[in-house]
Image: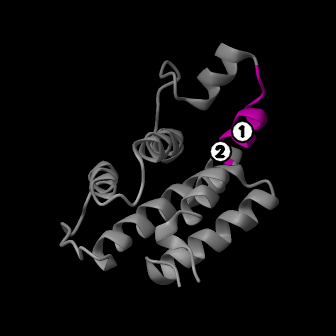
Amino acid sequence: MLPGGETAFAAWTEARTSFVHGNYIATVMLCQGLAEHILAAQLRLGLNGRELRKRITFNETLELCIDDKIITGKDADDLRRLMELRNPLSHFRDIDDPSNLSRRVLDTMVAAGTHLFRDASFAIGMAVRLLSLPAFRLG
């Protein structure tokens, strides 16, 4: 019953399992993917039934969701933060890039596992928060 169909449902199920089992990179990636799928699908299926570009960007999706009052500006800011956590896990970042995990460890003197746990905790919390919004509640 999630907008986004089987992909969204699988992402949600796997994100929960990944978090419980300590697969924190997977949790971050799955939660961000979940957000992209359910928000774009909600735009498509919602009362306004928007036509979307075939490959809409996440930022475009967020702006349209704000316009349709599916999410707030604060939600969008936090979802952008989630995207910023996922990007350096999906795409190479040089050691000098502040988002590189090794750079974060060196800058803060906090273990990589702690950074990943904090990132995953934020991600799973954001997914729960998103799914609890009025547009996605059942019943």
Q: Position of residue 47 (x, y in %)?
A: 29, 77
Q: Is residue 86 above or below residue 131?
A: above
The residue lying at 31 percent from left, 69 percent from top is 43
Which corner quadrant holds the C terminus? bottom right
For residue 42, what is the image quadrant? Answer: bottom left
Disc 2, SS: helix
Q: Position of residue 57 (x, y in %)?
A: 28, 54
Give the crowd class for mark 1: few <14, some 14-19, many >=20 residues within 10 Å: few
- Range covered by the magenta-colored residues: 110-120
Q: Magenta stretch: dominant SS?
A: helix
Which residue carries the number 1 mark? 118
Q: Is residue 114 above or below residue 22?
A: above
Pointer 2 with pointer 1, Cβ within 8 A: yes
Residue 88 magenta: no
> For this view, does 41 lie left or right of residue 31?
left
Which residue carries the number 2 mark? 122
Q: Position of residue 122 (x, y in %)?
A: 65, 44
For residue 13, what is the image quadrant? Answer: bottom right
The residue lying at 57 percent from left, 70 percent from top is 11
The residue lying at 47 percent from left, 22 percent from top is 97
- Farthest residue to the right: give it: 21
Give the crowd class for mark 2: few <14, some 14-19, many >=20 residues within 10 Å: some
Residue type at tag 2: Phe
Residue 118 magenta: yes
Residue type at tag 1: Arg
Disc 1, SS: helix
